[in-house]
Amino acid sequence: KNEVEQSPQNLTAQEGEFITINCSYSVGISALHWLQQHPGGGIVSLFMLSSGKKKHGRLIATINIQEKHSSLHITASHPRDSAVYICAVKRRGATNKLIFGTGTLLAVQP
Amino acid sequence: NAGVTQTPKFQVLKTGQSMTLQCAQDMNHNSMYWYRQDPGMGLRLIYYSASEGTTDKGEVPNGYNVSRLNKREFSLRLESAAPSQTSVYFCASSEMRQAPGANVLTFGAGSRLTVL
């Protein structure tokens, strides 16, 4: 079983919909990252969380340390949000090494 | 522009050939990483360097070597390429700062390597 699991693996939404992508992990962590990768493109860090909630524009990330779960929400989704969203965790006590989920492929249709 | 620059973007090799992927960052980060990304799998760490002068193996180091030439540069070498090393390679750098939320993780644009 992977230490970081994301759901769903694939998601198709209509423009304007509210989107939620989930990340569950099985190890103790000190931080969790949400990353975005456009098709054929590079990887961009969206958020780093160690507790609570963060918001940047239409993106909101939350984390529940006790439940070992994080969610990435996109409000008023737009076709340009179409990308792979990747969750990665930094194991508590480890060095800078990250454990990555396999990603959620999001397609937002106009 | 500030960020992580990796070269080349594309490369085709024959089995047994060698090559070096170059990576440089201009953000004064201490830590640098090399990952590979394969279909259906998460990014996997090949090697990392926590600071200048140190390197450590990641999950999948076999067939690779690295050099942390200085604080800016971290290169990945394939001594004798194999088809199993066909992948997209990403270099990244990071700095874990004291201020809450000030962790910075930056990736290069990726290098697509095909080994025939």
Image (cartoon, rainbow, N blue to C red):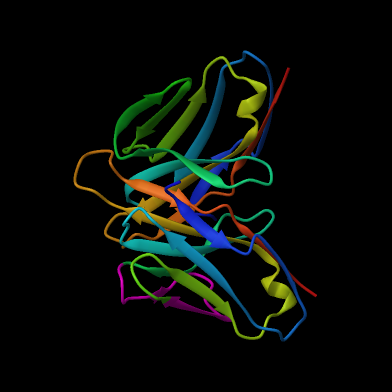
Q: In screen coordinates, is B74 left or right of B80?
A: left
Residue B110 placement (x, y as % from top left): 60, 56
Q: Nearer the viewer, residue A69 or A108?
A: A108
Q: Is residue A55 magenta?
A: no
- The residue lying furthest to the front in this view is B1
Residue B114: quarter of image: bottom right
Q: Is residue A72 above or below residue B113?
A: above
Q: Nearer the viewer, residue A90 or B32?
A: B32
Q: Residue at x 49, y 49 (%)?
A: A4
Q: Residue at x 63, y 20 (%)?
A: A78
Magenta span: chief secondary structure: loop
Q: Residue at x 65, y 31 (%)?
A: A82
Residue A2 placement (x, y as % from top left): 53, 54
- Say which quadrant the C terminus of chain B sits in: bottom right
Q: Nearer the viewer, residue B4 or A17?
A: B4
Residue A58 is at least partly visible in this image: yes
Q: Is residue B94 above or below residue A74?
A: below
Q: In screen coordinates, is B93 left or right of B42?
A: left
Q: Which residues are magenta?
A: B51-67
Residue A12 placement (x, y as % from top left): 70, 27
